[in-house]
Image: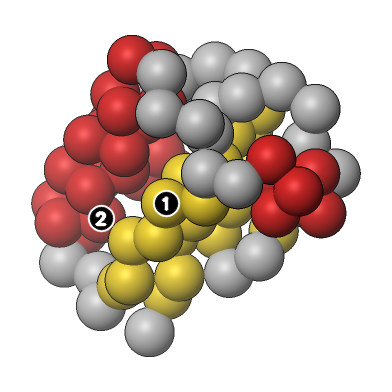
C-alpha cells in the first residue's frame, strides 16, 4: 500500500493539495493511505521549510505549491 502524505498546517492550499492527491490516486486505481501531516515538528522532520508539500512513501515530491492532478499522477506513477 502506498502512503501519500500531505504536509501542511491546514491552509487552503494544503486542503487543495489533499483533494488533488486523492483525485489523482483514485484515478490511477492505487491502493493507498492518505495522511495529513500538520504538526510543525513532523513537517520539519521531512526537511520541508515551506508548505504545502507532498510526500510519497516518505519521499518528498514537491514543496511550496499545489501541483495539478495530472502532475500528481506522474509523481505517484
Q: Residue 67 location, x and y as percent?
A: 44, 23
Nearer to the camera, 63 or 69 = 63
- Residue drawn 40% across the image and 39% down it: 72
Q: Quadrant of residue 13?
A: top left
- Residue drawn 69% across the image and 40% down it: 40
Q: Is residue 7 left or right of residue 11?
A: right
Give whichever of discs 2 and 1 has the lower sequence position.
2
Name the element at disc 1: strand
Q: Residue 16 location, x and y as percent?
A: 29, 24
Q: Residues within 10 Å of mark 2 (few under 14, many from 20)?
A: many
- Residue drawn 33% across the image and 71% down it: 33
Q: Residues within 10 Å of mark 1 (few under 14, many from 20)?
A: some
Q: Is residue 48 left or right of residue 30?
A: right
On screen, residue 17 above or below 55? above
Q: Which residue corresponds to mark 1?
A: 36
Identify the mark at residue 75; answer none if there is no mark.
Answer: none
Q: Is residue 19 visible in the rendered structure shown here? A: yes
Q: Is residue 15 left or right of residue 53?
A: left
Say which quadrant the N terminus sits in: bottom left
| Residue furthest bottom as drawn | 1
Q: Residue 64 location, x and y as percent?
A: 63, 18
Q: Is residue 44 left or right of residue 71?
A: right
Q: Which residue corresponds to mark 2?
A: 25
Indicate the colouring scheme.
secondary structure
On screen, residue 50 above or below 28? above
Say which quadrant the C terminus sits in: bottom left
- Residue drawn 25% across the image and 70% down it: 30
Q: Is there CB contact under 8 Å for labels 2 and 1? A: no
Q: Is residue 70 visible in the rendered structure shown here? A: no
Nearer mark to the viewer, of 2 and 1: 1
Name the element at disc 2: helix
Amino acid at each position: 500500500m502506498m502512503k501519500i502524505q500531505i504536509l501542511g498546517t491546514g491552509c487552503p492550499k494544503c486542503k487543495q493539495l489533499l483533494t488533488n492527491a486523492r483525485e489523482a490516486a483514485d484515478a490511477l486505481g492505487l491502493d493507498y493511505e492518505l495522511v495529513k501531516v500538520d504538526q510543525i515538528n513532523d513537517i520539519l522532520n521531512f526537511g520541508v521549510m515551506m508548505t504545502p508539500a507532498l510526500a510519497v512513501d516518505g519521499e518528498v515530491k514537491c514543496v511550496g505549491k499545489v501541483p495539478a492532478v495530472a502532475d500528481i499522477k506522474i509523481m505517484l506513477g
